[in-house]
Image: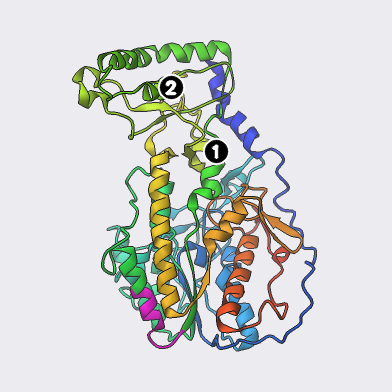
Amino acid sequence: MKNFKYIYIAFGIIVFTACSDPEEVDLAPEVMAVASAELTAGSADFSNYVAVGNSLTAGLTDGALFKAGQENSFPNILSSKFALVGGGSFTQPLTNDNFGGLAVGGARIAPPRFVFGGAGPVGLETLIGPITVTTDIALNNPAGPFNNLGVPLAKSFHVLAPGYGNLNNVALGLANPFFVRMTGATPDASILEMAVGQAPTFFSLWIGSNDVLGYATSGGDGTNPITPVSGPPGVGFDGSYGAVVATLTASGASGVVANIPNIIDIPHFTTVPYNPVPLDAATAAAVNGAYVPYNGGLQAAFGALAGTGLFTQEELDARTISFVAGANNAVVIEDESLTDLGAINPAFAALPKIRQATAADLLVLPAASFIGTLAVEGNPLTVNGVAIPLADKWVLIPSEQEEIAIATEAFNQIISSVSSQAGLAFVDANSILNQVANGGVTSGQFTLTSSLVTGSAFSLDGIHPTARGYALLANEFMKAIDATYGSSFEASGNFVNVGDYPTNYAPTLQ
């Protein structure tokens, strides 16, 4: 069974071959349209721009918040263009370095960023050795107020939550360490209160992705549920989103909002294949032998329940586990949607709800480094994903994907309706990501796709954009602002050149 130890290595080769050098950034000038109009703000007043949102607004990249990523956030890019037509200063809660990570009183609570390790994403310390996380929410928070109120991990209802930035609430699970850095002398102020307290004349609001993303990244295991579609402010998405927009626009501010992408199209869920297990004939036979009792139990249950319709031939076939000699065996997964045979007949209580994955299942990106490891050190009969089924947190089964799709559609209908009634500019981020995932989006000389590492759109966490991806989004925000407020960012040739923004950050960047 020695070949099991090569499962992950072989997988890494399959996924990350033909990767370009992550430190080679093409800064060739993009051929821009000849300016045919003067740059104007139209009816928008950019003099005091405030950005409200989550990690996508904060500029989180490569799984961490760090200075260079924040400087390339789409709101910061927008602010540089707004400054050309009366926009004021734009302050961000910059971290202390480019390592990333967070600490509280010297104890690390969030890891440093990912870097490219030659075969795929690895932790920064894998390449440069141990580092000290210097951004400490108990020791060195920056002074506000901050125009960029993008708070990683924030959901729609968190924007309204008092105490969400109170250090004393972090240990209770009621506060967000990233927001603690922003609240200063008003620790119980909500994100929304800190936004309207600055009397913005223009705002961007991109919130809602985490209302489904947390459920998805946890494999739909229930530890991070989808936000209810309906409910009062602070509970349901409709009530929360409506309250946020109503409050931001109450004093006459203009703004731009974006909807929620179909998150299962991002590389965090599309990179790891369902069938990455290489086995030789002897190992396949040994593993099949280990599953003989399980497969036999399924046959017995099928025979006992014949004619009842409670256990179909289709489900029997799906649950029967079989490995063959070759490089592309499917992993074994837990699937809570399978029939609970023990509940029908206690004689079958020992039969777990497991099956081999299919192309319809989506494995989360961290599964890449887990598949093929040993559940019991030194015991080759405990290979995760083969002898030991992958737990729910590692995979999104079709029923869970459907839950995400239904919620995303409902949330986007709310965003569209609320923003339309308020007369706000609207960015269809869902459509943009769909284009990125299906052939790519071309901007000037550059095409951005959703391939991890090589696609240029997504950073190494498979969730957040690269700096180039954020630049593309900034252009889309300006396009929407032009359409609603009559500004001329596009017509005057003031879109940013996405080629001026990197796709990777070097491990040596400190």
Where residue 331 appears, x then y in whole percent?
48, 28
Tell me, yes or no, if residue 139 can be seen here: no
Front: mark 1 or 2: 1
> Residue extending furthest front?
307
Q: Is residue 345 left or right of residue 192?
A: left
Tell me, yes or no, if residue 252 can be seen here: yes
> Residue extending furthest left?
346
| Disc 2 residue crowd, few under 14, some 14–19, many 20+, Cα 10 Å | some
Q: Which residues are magenta?
A: 243-253
Where residue 13 appears, x then y in whole percent?
65, 33
At label 2, which amino acid type do we have?
A: Ala
User: Mark 2: which secondary structure?
Assistant: loop
Quadrant where the C terminus is found in the figure: bottom right
Residue 343 higher or lower than 165, as above or below: above
Towards the viewer: 341 or 25: 341
Where residue 79 appears, x then y in whole percent?
59, 78
Q: Is residue 106 left or right of residue 323?
A: left
Residue at the image position 73 percent from the left and 77 percent from the top: 493
Mark 1 or mark 2, earlier in chain: 1
Main secondary structure type of the part rendered in magenta: helix
User: Mark 1: which secondary structure?
Assistant: loop
> Which quadrant of the figure has residue 273?
top right
Q: Read off the residue under disc 1.
A: 272
| Disc 1 residue crowd, few under 14, some 14–19, many 20+, Cα 10 Å | many
Q: Is residue 249 magenta?
A: yes
Q: Read off the residue under disc 2.
A: 387
